[in-house]
Each structure stands twice: as structure tokens, then as C-alpha cells.
Image: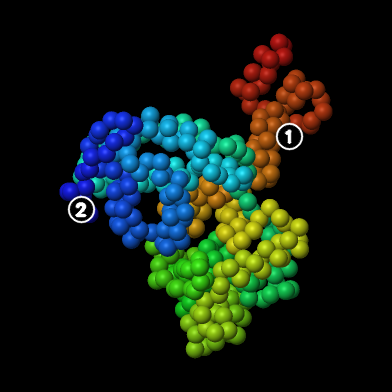
Amino acid sequence: MSLEDSSLTMDVEGERTLGFLFRDLIVVWKKFHFLLIEESTQQKYENLLPAVDFLLDYPVNKIDGQVLNRLAYFWMNDFPRSFRRKSFMKEWQMLRVILQFYKEEVPEGAGYAMPSFKKLKKMTTLVPNVEGEVKYLNSEETIAFLQRLKNRHRTYYYTALLQYFFALRIGEVCALYKDCVDLNKRVITIRRSVHWDFRTWEPKIKEHTKTKRVRYLPIPLELVPELKGLIDVSDPKNPLLMPRHDGSPLNRKTIATYYNTMLKSLGFTHVSGTHFMRRTSATLANEATGDIDAISRFLGHSSVRVTRRYTGETDHQKQKVSSALSDVFRVDGATDVMFGANVDPQKPSTHILSKKLRLISGS
């Protein structure tokens, strides 16, 4: 069906209206948008699409705030949902992508005003977000996890080690070629990724990463002997750094299962799978540097907003903020005036702050 002949007549809520239907938009959107995204993202969208069946018979140019209010009401009251669901955030994000495609790509979408999603997202949040909700291992837990892997399974120890030091997706680790590791210049090149079919788990190496960006990352000195040893014992006939016995890339599901076994044995039940290592790397890097822009580039994210979803707030960061606020009062006489003489002054007073403290004390 072409865009030109896609205007249909449909009865919506008792009114006869003309327009490009949402069900037709889905067809066109998938036809073009699915060429640009990974298969794993396509599968995610396919799983989410039944949630927007409510809109199928609506003309797209009639989908406004009022219609989306009805959709939100439907999701909250009538849509079947798992007891573990916390929000409909992913469904709203997908709907925004679809409507944005209509606005920018479909001729009839010219001049279409995107409805606001802000209040709707809050309306369909079932469980409030908790600060620090990002799941990661702290520094002590990371060391314990890597040590346990080193003692039990050397290959998966290397996959976790590479994930940590380079904040890699597991598909990027499994697609590493030996010629991507330059030990002389101490640079590793991230240019490929492995995709697994979720039904058969057959691997497929793609000549690009998820964001289609090539990253050149420095190799820490501590990692040089580890990588050299890994290359020395690898099969010279296979370009992969860590292949399976049959020469194919490692299986993500198998790695995740083994990670989970080791995590459970250590009592770390708050994380699972493989992606937590990338979040751990991002979070600990942010704790150490505070440079979210550099970390975003290191991870190969499209924007800093994406990186912020990867970085949890650590107790150490909270303590730094608390200490910084306390330091304001660590001047000559300030603690005595405000809180008594329980805390020793640590910094010399400034003229302005001393003057303010005298006003507070009434002296």
C-alpha cells in the first residue's frame, strides 16, 4: 500500500473521519524503520506492539492528548499486565518513535503536532522509581566476581574482564577479532558485534556495533599481559579472540547462565544476565571521574541521556556531596556558632563568610 492511496474512511467513536489510520502507519513504519535498527530491537518492538492495538482504527492525525488519555486509562484498567510491571515507559517510548516517524516522514504528517507524553508517563507509572535503581556491582563486589570467575572458568573470566575495562556489550566482546587488539599501541578497536537469534541462538557477526560507531579505546597496563596470554593460546586459524570449540562466537545465553551461577554463589542476587557488567563499568567510572560526557563517548552512546540511565548513584558519591555541604561550616568559629564545639575547624575563614556568621550569632 502506497502513502498516496492510504487515506481511508473509518468510524471512530461514532464519527466518520478521513485519515491515514494508525494500523497503516504501523505497516509503513516497520517497512522503513526496521531497516535501521538491530534485530534485537525489532523483536522488542514486536513484543510491545500489541499494547497499542487500542489505536489501530484511529486516523493518526486525530491522535491527540485526549485520545492518549483514553489509551492511558485503558492500560491502567483493562490491559493485561504482569504483576512485576512497574510502568508503561517502554510503550510510550515506542509510540513516540512511531508518531515522530509519521510527523517527519509521512506526507500527511506535515504540520502534525506531537502530543505531550510527560503527564501520561506519570499517570501510567505503577511503582515509583527509586534513586540508584540501576543494577550494578560495587568495586568490592566486582573484584569478588572476577576472582570467582578466574578460579572457575577462564574464558568467561576474560569476557567479564573485557566488559569491565572497556564497558562493552557482550555482543561486542564475542565479536572481537585478534587484529582489533594492538598491544604495541595499547589500543583496542570495537567495530563488530554478534547478534543471536532468540529462538535458535545461532550467532551472526555483524560488521558494525549497535550504534554503528567504531570506538578506539586505550588498553590499561594491567590488561596487557592478560590479553597477550589470551592471544598466545588462541587458534591461529581463527580470527576471533575467544571462539567456541567449533570456531563460532561464544553463546550469550550460556555466558549469562554461568554469570548468574557465580553471582548466586556470592550472594549477589541484585544483578543478573551479562549487561550488568557494562552498567557496573559506567557507574564506577562515573564515581571515579564524574565526567559523564567522556564516559558517554567511551560507551559509544548516542547521547549523554542514554548514559545517565546506565549510571547508578553510589553511596560514595552521596557522601562526597554531603561532605561538600558540611565543609561550608568547617571555618574558624563556624561550627561553634551553628552546632557547638563538637567539630574541629579545618579551613581558614573568609572575610565574607565570617561576616555572615557574626550576623547569625548576633555578635
Q: Give x and y (percent) for residue 114.
A: 33, 36
**Quadrant showing the C terminus:** top right
Answer yes or no: is residue 162 visible. no
Q: Decide if residue 213 is on the left or right side of residue 199.
A: left
Residue 326 location in percent, x, y? 69, 32
Q: Which residue is mark 2?
A: 2
Amino acid on which the number 1 mark rests in the picture? Gln
- Give SS at disc 2: loop
**Residue at the outermost top position:** 362
Identify residue for label 1: 346
Name the amino acid type tagged 2.
Ser
Residue 84 in sight from this viewpoint: yes
User: Which is nearer the eye, 186 or 88?
Assistant: 88
> What residue is rendered at 44% in x and 42% in y?
92
Question: Label 1: few (<14), some or many (≥20) within 10 Å?
Answer: few
Q: Residue at x 54, y 79 (%)?
A: 243
Marks 1 and 2, the one that precedes in the sequence: 2
Q: Residues within 10 Å of mark 2 (few under 14, many from 20)?
A: few
Q: For numbered disc 1, what is the local secondary structure?
A: loop
* Quarter where residue 265 is shown: bottom right
